[in-house]
Image (cartoon, helix red, strand yellow):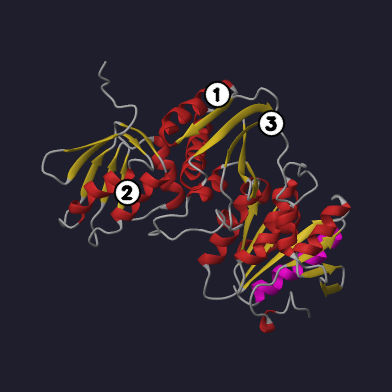
Amino acid sequence: MISEQPQVGLRIDALGDGNRLSVAGTLDATTSARLENALRPLLATGTDVHLDLSRLIFADVSGATVLATSAQRLPDGRRLVLERPPRQLRRIIDLFWPEVPCIQVVTR
Amino acid sequence: MTLTTDPTTTRGFVHPALFYSGTAEYLAGCVPFVRAGLTAGEPVAIAVPPENLGVLAGELGADAGQVHFVDMTQVGRNPGRIIPGVLRPFADEHRDGRVRIIGEPIWPGRSSVEYPACAQHEALINHAFAGRDVTILCPYDVAGLAPSTVRDAAVTHPVLISGDREWASDEFRPDDIVARYNEPLPAPPPGAPTRRFDVDDLPGLRRFVITESSRLGLSADRRDDLELMVNELATNAVRHGGGAGVLRIWGPEHTTVACEVESGGQIEDPLSGRIPVGLDDDHGRGLLLINLLADLVRVHTGPEGTTVRVYLLT
């Protein structure tokens, strides 16, 4: 059986013009380095970076840390836009990076 | 004028315990302390149980508007949350001068399960604020608290106040308290659901926790929080604790669900998880998340291994 949503592991796909990724599956200490590597080349392009997180099942502190520290490496005024993140990821961001301007959470 | 109330001569961290009995002594010990801070232009916060918040706010009258009030039974229900979630954020927000806080983390309703974490918290404040221009006055209700609790306060506070007297504690040895209350945790009930895990089993462990905590009556939001906490503890166990561990979960006891992770490895720094982390730091948030989210955290750590137990209200 092939599952539509991976229960374990992380899947990262480029969407459209390259400053937008889909991140699906599980973002934890075993997978967060892959996301960091995928984000690195996008941080210097001078544009906002969008992540579709609607198919992310779980994200932990290490995953949230990759997102937040990556966002802080964007050029001034640019943002990492987190689209439809799971509730637990929002919880972690609210705890440790509340109202950080380079991180924008879009919930719908 | 004393060390505690005279802002002009004070340097570094000041951490007195105020022994009081009854409202009149409470007000006599706290209100001049607050007013001296306001007169000196210091930011003042009061984090005490709600009935004492009301008494202080009433006595301060119009001055209450300049004071930041928080209910310690809510924000400090977990003693491990008080430094990173209450005291340091207020002090760190006002780094350009002295900050003054009344913190009452131990009240007569604290249970025997909570107390060891309370005493360790009082001891660790001394390290978390070493060298900082901060004054934290800790009232102790000597009429309502156990005599042993009051004796411990003389070990965790370098300065003691009672009535008109203020003196240096000759028993001040806070690290003794950290060590003494690093005690084996009460045994889980026989038959508590148990799962061994290693690095390949983190997703399975998370599913196990969600299933069991649902069965035990945790709300969906708190199940999610527990999953995050267990994930951090298990990640620490597989990285620093010998690659594997054991999780146990049980309850509800006294409207709480308890969940613990036992593994190898020792927590060397007792301030782990108690100090706020900079926005761009790439580590140091695992135990911090647990202290911020749990209703109570108890830890037993040593060369034989570490058990971290979290309690969540149902």
Do the residues at discs 2 and 3 belong to one chain?
no
Distance, label 2 to label 3, CA atoms, is 38 Å
Distance, label 3 to label 1, CA atoms, is 15 Å
Based on the picture, tell me whether residue B37 belongs to the magenta stretch: yes
Question: What is the crowding at mark 3: few (fewer than 14 residues within 10 Å), some, or many (at least 20)?
Answer: some
Circle 3: residue type: Pro
Point out which mark residue B212 bears.
1
Q: Is residue B25 above or below residue B145?
A: below
Quadrant placement of the N terminus of chain B: bottom right
Dot 3: element? loop
User: Residue A75 at x, y = what percent?
Assistant: 22, 61
- Is residue B180 visible in this depiction of the protein? yes
Question: What is the crowding at mark 1: few (fewer than 14 residues within 10 Å), some, or many (at least 20)?
Answer: some
Q: Quickly name the residue at label 2.
A: A67
Seen as rendered, the residue at the extreme left is A17
- Mark nearer the N terminus (3 vs 1): 3
Based on the picture, tell me whether residue A72 belongs to the magenta stretch: no
Q: Which residues are magenta?
A: B24-39
- Is residue B104 visible in this depiction of the protein? no
